[in-house]
Image: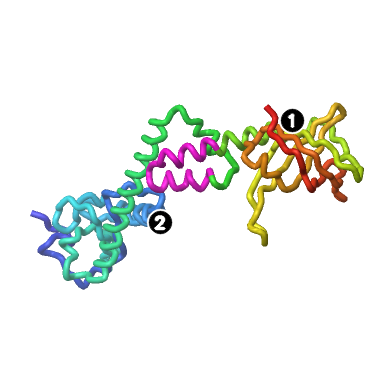
Amino acid sequence: MRTDIHAPKSLVTEDYEYVGAFDNGTHFGHYQVTLLQRSLELRQLLAGSKTAQYGNGAQCDHCGAHIRYVGVLRHIPTGDHIAVGEVCLDNRFPLSTQEFHRLRKAAELDRQAHKIQLDWAAYIAEHSEVDWVALSDSSNSFVQDVLRKGARYGNLSQRQLDAIVGAVERDGQRAERQAAEALEPKVAVPDTDARILVEAELLHKKWEDNQFGGSFKGLLKVTTAAGSYKLWGNLPKAVTQAEQGARIRFEAKVVRSDKDESFGFWSNPRKAVVLP
């Protein structure tokens, strides 16, 4: 027979005040860090209480039942703290109701977050052929945004995965090209009023709208025995279907840029063809 001051027959409700609550069942994931800190603080209060029947939060210090949601009460006469289950608190400390509801919601969020983390880890393991380190280290904002979505939902669609893998590969190829180009000698764009024969590699093309509907613009790299230079302008219709890396040829007038002698612009192209 219990004779301590917290036993059911000895309890004086007015001698207790509500301090807080914690959940024995949650994993305390990333979104519950503040709850974890609060739980540790409350557990320390219980561990330091000399009059608590158990002092560990696993059982109700009032009735002895094993509990998950733990209310911590301060015994005003002694200053000690006890753990009390939700049932024992019912109708005695109504202020605790909101906090227990918050704990349940946090626990549900934690379960969901924990499951998503496991799903995401399993998804990565299932796609071991992917260089996840390269994806994670990528500075491409699109790649990082898709990875965040994967971690949020636990998986990616095949289309999303293909897109970020392709983006990283293209970024790598672009970096290699830029590194190689940095070592290449540059020459000045021809300074002449006459039309010249342009034979070049198509580095990039894009559609630009204008008042006449729009046109394809292209960036070309012309390589000579002495070095290379680049040109920008409207692609002739005969070569608008050319892919990146294709070699094209046409006659046109070229103008050297005022800011960079190895960059220029072409106009009035004629006799355009895609070379084999």
Label 1: how many Cα within 10 Å (few below 14, some 14–19, many 20+): few
Q: Is residue 121 magenta?
A: no
Return the disc, 1 or 2, that comes first in the chain's sequence: 2
Residue 90 location in percent, x, y?
A: 17, 66
Q: Is residue 275 left or right of residue 190?
A: left
Residue hosting label 2: 34
Mark identifier at residue 180 = 1
Looking at this rendering, what residue extends furthest in the bottom direction?
14
Give the residue type that dot 1 points to.
Ala
Query: In this picture, which residue range is highlighted in magenta?
Result: 143-166
Residue 275 as seen in the image, left or right of residue 241: right
Q: Residue furthest right?
A: 192
Question: What is the image's colouring?
Answer: rainbow
Q: Residue at x 24, y 56 (%)?
A: 69
Q: Is residue 165 magenta?
A: yes
The residue drawn where x is 62% and y is 40% is: 241
